[in-house]
Image (cartoon, rainbow, N blue to C red):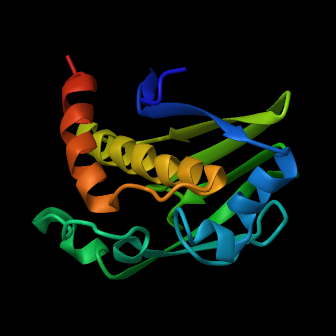
Amino acid sequence: MNDYGVVSEPGTLRFERLLPGPIERVWSYLIQSDKRGRWLAYGDIEPRVGGKVEHIWRNNELTENDAPAPEKYRAYAGEHRMQGRVTVYEPPHALAYTWGDDPDTSSEVRYELSPRGDQVLLVLTHSRLASRDGMTSVGSGWHTHLGILADRLHGREPAGFWRTHTRLEAEYAARIAAPQ
């Protein structure tokens, strides 16, 4: 399995990760604020379609021994918030929500979980991304956050968030083709 996200259609990135199960454990890391905050962002998710989603990022606190945030992401180094709406809620197999609260400009994130023996396949799809630069940033961000999730579930100490994100952003810039 390749850890890199792939462009599955225009404006859409898809990631796959095989994680230690059971499925209910992985689901809890998607929906419970205290667990999600250890790899992505804190905040409540109302458990129903149409429910509110709040993400409270504290990327500087995700990992130890990290580099400072790059200048272009300095505004996201401290606490940063985002709202959205749940579009799919099917525990413990599928969760989707808008990435932002403006219906005209929001993208959408979808998580799909399926058991694979004692492991769980997580498929994350982020769609309606408006630009190549956005896809590059989102690609490196998800890759970094999913790496931290995998490390947390495996009981390992993750590598520095910003150090990893910066390296991966350059790799995603090379991987995601410029529009023709």
Using the rendered view, name the quadrant where residue 170 is placed.
top left
Q: Camera-side residue: 176 or 171?
A: 171
Name the spot of residue 107 as percent of width and height, x first. Answer: 49, 50
Q: Is residue 131 visible?
A: yes
Using the rendered view, name the quadrant where residue 43 is placed.
bottom right
Q: Is residue 9 visible?
A: no
Left or right: residue 25 compared with residue 52: right
Which residue is the extreme one toward the bottom?
A: 79
Left or right: residue 174 compared with residue 127: left
Which quarter of the image is occupied by the C terminus? top left
Identity of the residue drawn at 77% across and 64% down: 50
Q: Camera-side residue: 122 or 130?
A: 122
Name the spot of residue 80 as percent of width and height, x first. Answer: 39, 78
Q: Is residue 32 above or below residue 104?
A: below
Which residue is the extreme one toward the top?
A: 180
Q: Is residue 85 above or below residue 21?
A: below
Identity of the residue drawn at 77% across and 35% down: 119
Name the spot of residue 85 as percent of width and height, x first. Answer: 66, 64
Identity of the residue drawn at 40% across and 49% down: 144
Q: Is residue 176 above or below residue 58?
A: above
Q: How many numbered circles are shown? A: 0
Q: Camera-side residue: 98 or 15?
A: 15
